[in-house]
Image (cartoon, grey):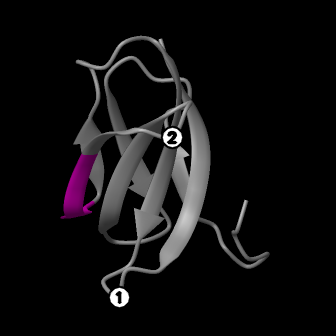
Amino acid sequence: SNVNAASTIAVVPNPTTGNIAIMGVDHADLAIYNIIGQPVKSIKQANQIAIGDLPAGVYIVKLFNEQGMNIHTQRIIKQ
């Protein structure tokens, strides 16, 4: 992943059944992709997102700052 060594950003809880929250930054644009890279959900400048409506499986969460730079990428498991 493209996270620098000083980063302490994390998406929690993982695995999750419903909501996920971001830690380490106040807010970010969140984009969630399925395992084949299709965007399934996004939210602007937030610190959490509800994913209870998504099917169980593995997803990729990408966080972007206000300038649109990808600041964190993490695989999560939705149960």
Please give the name of the residue rendered at 34% of the width and 72% of the height, measured from the top-left corner.
26
Magenta stretch prevailing secondary structure: strand
Is 34 displayed left or right of 35 in the figure? Answer: left
Is 40 displayed left or right of 6 in the figure? Answer: left
Q: Position of residue 2 (x, y in %)?
A: 70, 68
What SS does tag 2 mark? loop
Foreground of the two, 49 or 64: 64
* Mark 1 residue crowding within 10 angstroms, few (<14) / some (14–19) / many (20+): few
Based on the displayed image, in which of its 4 quarters is residue 76 positioned?
top right
Instruction: Tally the numbered discs.
Output: 2
User: Which one is earlier in the sequence, the residue at label 2 or at label 1?
Assistant: 2
Q: Position of residue 45 (x, y in %)?
A: 22, 68
Please give the name of the residue rendered at 26% of the width and 49% of the height, measured from the top-left corner.
42
Quadrant where the image shows the N terminus: bottom right
Find out whether residue 43 is within the magenta segment.
yes
Q: Is residue 2 above or below residue 19?
A: below
> Label 1 is placed on what type of residue?
Gln
Based on the displayed image, in which of its 4 quarters is residue 10 positioned?
bottom right
Foreground of the two, 33 or 13: 33
> Label 2 is placed on what type of residue?
Gly
Based on the displayed image, in which of its 4 quarters is residue 29 positioned?
bottom left
In this picture, which residue range is highlighted in magenta? Answer: 42-46
Q: Position of residue 63 (x, y in %)?
A: 44, 62
Is 2 displayed left or right of 61 in the figure? Answer: right
Residue of label 2: 37
Find out whether residue 34 is within the magenta segment.
no
Comparing labels 2 and 1, the label whose residue is closer to the camera: 2
Q: Is residue 9 above or below residue 61?
A: below
Residue 67: give its label.
Answer: 1
Q: Position of residue 51 (x, y in %)?
A: 29, 28
* Mark 2 residue crowding within 10 angstroms, few (<14) / some (14–19) / many (20+): few
